[in-house]
């Protein structure tokens, strides 16, 4: 799996959509230069929060990989009412890897 390597950060300003005045957008940059994502939301705070979550994605992916490395699932996936943390991390990794 490949993605743009480097430090991802959200731009801490959001621009209001001229057409509707409700939605805002902001960017997620890698190494302060490469736009890796544009986030939007109904309102400035929602757009900024979405961008912060996107900017955290590389670290979250690595954290999930660290959690599942060397651990076995303690639940039976299909029978547990709620998947265990290991299964949740594995599902997040698989979601990120889908093409």
Image (cartoon, helix red, strand yellow):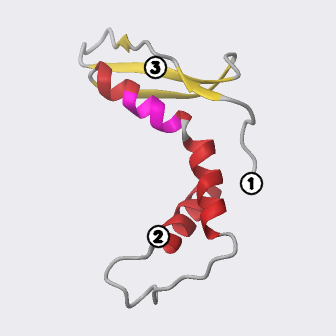
Q: Is residue 9 above or below residue 77?
A: above
Q: Is residue 63 visible?
A: yes
Front one among 15 and 63: 63
Q: What separation in Å lies between label 3 and label 1 (alpha carbons)?
A: 26 Å
Q: Main secondary structure of the magenta part?
A: helix
Residue 45 location (% of width, % of height)? 30, 23
The residue carrying mark 2 is: 85
Horizontal arrangement in the rendering, residue 11 relative to residue 67 (left or right): left
SS category of the residue bearing label 3: strand
Residue 90 location (% of width, % of height)? 57, 68
Q: Are marks 3 and 2 in contact (CB under 8 Å)?
A: no
Residue drawn at the location 51% of the way across and 17% of the way down: 11
The residue carrying mark 1 is: 1
Q: Earlier in the sequence, mark 3 or mark 2?
A: 3
SS category of the residue bearing label 1: loop
Quadrant of the rendered structure where residue 18 is? top left
Residue drawn at the location 33% of the way across and 11% of the way down: 16
Q: What separation in Å lies between label 1 and label 2 (alpha carbons)?
A: 22 Å
Q: Earlier in the sequence, mark 3 or mark 1?
A: 1
Front one among 75 and 36: 75
Q: Which residues are magenta?
A: 49-54
SS category of the residue bearing label 2: helix
Q: Is residue 41 visible?
A: no
In magenta stretch: residue 79: no
The residue carrying mark 3 is: 26
Residue drawn at the location 41% of the way across and 20% of the way down: 25
Q: What separation in Å lies between label 3 and label 2 (alpha carbons)?
A: 31 Å
Front one among 23 and 93: 93
Residue drawn at the location 47% of the way across and 70% of the way down: 85
Q: Earlier in the sequence, mark 1 or mark 2?
A: 1
Residue 38 location (% of width, % of height)? 51, 26
């Amino acid at each position: 799996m490949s993605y743009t390597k480097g430090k991802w950060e959200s731009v801490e300003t959001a621009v209001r959509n001229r057409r509707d005045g409700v939605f805002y957008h902001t960017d997620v940059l890698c190494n302060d230069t490469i736009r890796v994502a544009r986030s939007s939301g109904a309102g400035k705070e929602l757009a900024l929060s979405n961008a912060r979550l996107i900017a955290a994605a590389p670290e979250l992916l690595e954290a999930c990989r660290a959690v599942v490395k060397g651990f076995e699932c303690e639940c039976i996936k299909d029978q547990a009412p709620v998947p265990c943390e290991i299964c949740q991390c594995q599902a997040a990794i698989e979601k990120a890897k889908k093409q």
